[in-house]
Image: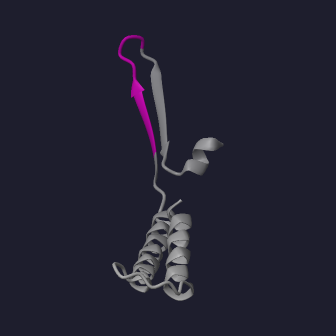
Amino acid sequence: MSIGFGIFLFAVGAILAFAVQVSVEWIALTTVGYILMVAGAVMVVIGGVLMARKRSSVTTQRTQLDPANGEQVTRRESIASDPVDDRI
């Protein structure tokens, strides 16, 4: 989502900076366009970094002897932070 919004900001900024030839006294549209282009580029970079970061996965297996009836109890626990693994 942040990558798409970053591209949108960059496109709107480029339109304001290069295509709009309207002169407004109280605001410089070219400067606003450049600011939006920089903000869009930063959002695309941050979105790419967040998508590419390493996914973590934790697997724990514990084996215990139940003192009440002498049985061996095995507990398995898996935690995956990758949303693709949760859908399978």
In this rendered view, identify the residue nearer to me: 44 or 87: 44
User: Would you say residue 64 sits in the magenta stretch?
Assistant: yes
Q: What secondary structure is the magenta-colored segment mainly?
A: strand
User: Would you say residue 26 sits in the magenta stretch?
Assistant: no
Residue at x 53% of width, y 88% of height: 18
Residue 25 position, x and y percent, is: 36, 82
* Rendered view: 48 above or below 20: above
Residue at x 55% of width, y 72% of height: 7
Residue at x 55% of width, y 80% of height: 15
* Rendered view: 51 above or below 79: below
Q: Residue furthest right?
A: 88
- Image quadrant where one finds the C terminus: top right
Residue 26 position, x and y percent, is: 33, 78
Q: Which residues are magenta?
A: 59-69
Residue 61 position, x and y percent, is: 45, 38
Image quadrant in which you'd find residue 32? bottom left
